[in-house]
Amino acid sequence: MDARRLRPLAAVLAASLAAGGCRFAWNLWARGDLARDVTSLLAKQGILVSGVKCRMFGTLRAGACTFPFTAEQTSLLAKGLKLRVLAPTENIREFAGGCSETRPFDKDFVRTFRTAAFRPPELKLRDGGSFDYVYLYHHPTSGRACVQVAYTQEGATTASPITN
């Protein structure tokens, strides 16, 4: 293709990214990695899923994924990752567009779990990275789950509690 024809296309693309900010580009780029990492984390527990759809939270290294999930898979994952039941009055680290704001997890009966510790060894990823925490929401009626996670920042050596 002629370079003169590519210039207007490049200009439109650059303008779109500038108008949408880094948030759109980050979400587009990082959600595939998040889907791969969540799928891999589940596979380490012997759980194979398909149809994983993820989104990042703004420009943060955190996001959420939804996928079909049974009650048995939920129990298996909770046991394997040493998740505990989230108390209804407990504070959670929530983001706009997080699991508790996503249908069907925003209404009806939902089983909710979270990691008991910050950066537990069960959340190690195959590339050497890790998640700081996992929230697991399961909606038994629809047979769907939402997993909300945050990646550990590279080089982080200190832990902070997940109290909010």
Image: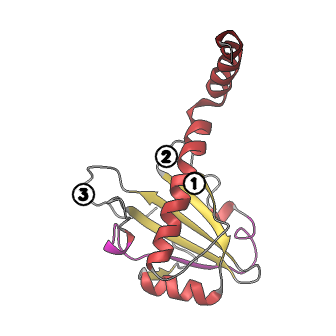
Q: Amino acid at mark 3?
A: Thr
| Residue 59: % across, % down | 52, 42
Query: Where residue 95 is drawn, which disc sits there?
Result: 1
Residue 137's image quarter? bottom right
Q: Amino acid at mark 2?
A: Leu
Which element is circle 2 on? loop
Disc 2 versus disc 3: distance between alpha carbons?
19 Å
Residue most toward the front? 1
Q: Is 113 one of the magenta-colored residues?
A: yes
Which scheme is used to colour this image of the protein?
Answer: secondary structure
Per the image, the residue denoted by label 2 is 60
Residue at which label 3 appears: 158
Give the side of residue 104 with respect to residue 18, left or right: right
In terms of secondary structure, what is the magenta stretch mainly? loop
> Furthest-left residue in view?
157
SS label for mark 1:
loop
Local crowd size for mark 1, using a 10 Å CA cut-off: few (<14), some (14–19), many (≥20) = some
Q: Is residue 163 above or below residue 44?
A: above
Extent of the magenta region: 103-122
